[in-house]
Amino acid sequence: MTSAITFTKIIAFLILISSTSCAFKRIHRDKNIIYMKTDSTRSIPSLSLNIFSPRKPVDKNVLIFIHGGSWRSGDKKLYSFFGSRMARKGVVTVIINYPLSPVGDFNDMAYASASSVKWVHENIDQFGGDRNKIFVSGHSAGGHLAALISVRDEYLDSVGIKSPIKGAILIDAAGLDMYGYLMEEKKPEGHSYLKTFTPNPREWKKASPLYHLHKGMPPFLIYKGENTYASIHRSHDKFVKVLPNFTSKVNYHVLKRKKHVPMITQFVWTWNPRYDEILHFMNGIADTTN
């Protein structure tokens, strides 16, 4: 799992690249919208999101993206390049912030992510999105959170909503088996992952999407880099191996020669074929649920 500082520096560099890239279609950008007010019971500060939408959106697919950063760094503003490109391809795209470690643990992060889904479900029609076509996605730690709220109904139940998630798109997701990883690694007391996931192995299992798969859960589109971290290889292998026990639709792609960070930076390129694959996945599900 990558250094949070290095990860953030690389993503920040993309802001400069994306700001000079060509824009073929004008889009709307609505930024810093509060989706969750300060929660004193959880000591979580107010949280916001950015929305990128086509100029004339009407009942569009909606994608909520959760950023990575080892659960302790990152910011929604670093991923405007992704939101802008998805919006130009006809998808209302929402990029969220969530409480980072040590301010919040994995439960706080998942609760916040679920709260963003609720907010989107209740408000996205004002931005041209269809509340019945909501998908979640994330890279690295964000992929973990997207998977977790897709398979553990407790989080959406806790914010008072039945899951509206139609599908999950994981981009080199970390932590799919956080239990297995932490059991093997034996992290020292005070390590950031133990602050995020607690020192309790029972909590590690609760945090691991691998142990919460069930029939009727949303379908997954999963990407893994061929040259990603060994821990991500191991957890993906376990995850994909058991998926057929719960769904007949397994959309799994291993991208040749791709390392962990390039799995998200590849989306700077407007013509990246992953965009078409994601659109095909979303449209196929949206069409069958209308």
Image: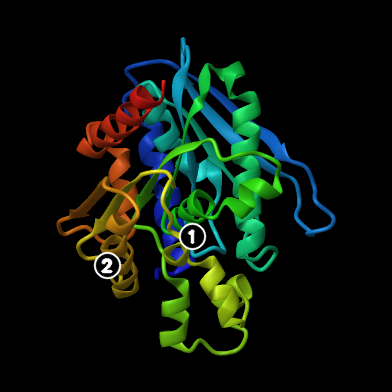
Compared across the picture, whether 160 is left or right of 135 comes to right
Is residue 172 visible in the rendered structure shown here? yes
Name the residue at 50% across, 56% down.
Answer: 148
- Mark 1 vs 2, N-terminal side: 1
Q: Name the residue under label 2.
A: 237
In this view, 286 is above or below 246: above
Viewer-proximal residue among 230 and 8: 230
Considering depth in this image, is 267 or 222 the residue closer to the camera?
222
Which residue does the image show at 44% across and 49% down from the upper left? 138
Q: Which quarter shows the N terminus?
A: bottom left
Q: Which residue lies furthest to the right in this view?
A: 40
Locate residue 92, reporting x and y percent.
Answer: 47, 25
Residue that appears at 36% across and 31% down: 20
Task: Using the rendered view, name the quadrant where residue 140 is placed.
Answer: bottom left
Determine whether the residue tagged by mark 2 lies in a helix, strand or loop.
helix
Total tally of numbered discs in the picture: 2
Locate residue 280 relative to residue 150 in the image: left or right.
left
Marker disc for residue 159: none
- Visual colour scheme: rainbow
Vertically, is 270 above or below 12?
A: above
Q: Quadrant of residue 268?
A: top left
Residue 95 in percent (x, y) is at 52, 39
Q: Where is residue 126 in the image (x, y as percent from the top left)?
A: 61, 17
Cα–Cα gap, marks 1 and 2: 22 Å
Q: Is mark 1 on a helix, strand or loop?
A: loop
Residue contact between numbered discs 1 and 2, judged by CB atoms under 8 Å: no
Residue under label 1 = 69
Q: Nearer the viewer, residue 14 or 70?
A: 70
Mark 1, other Cα within 10 Å: few <14 / some 14–19 / many ≥20: many
Q: Which amino acid does label 2 sit on?
A: Asp
Three-letter amino acid code of the residue under disc 1: Gly
Q: Residues within 10 Å of mark 2 (few under 14, many from 20)?
A: few
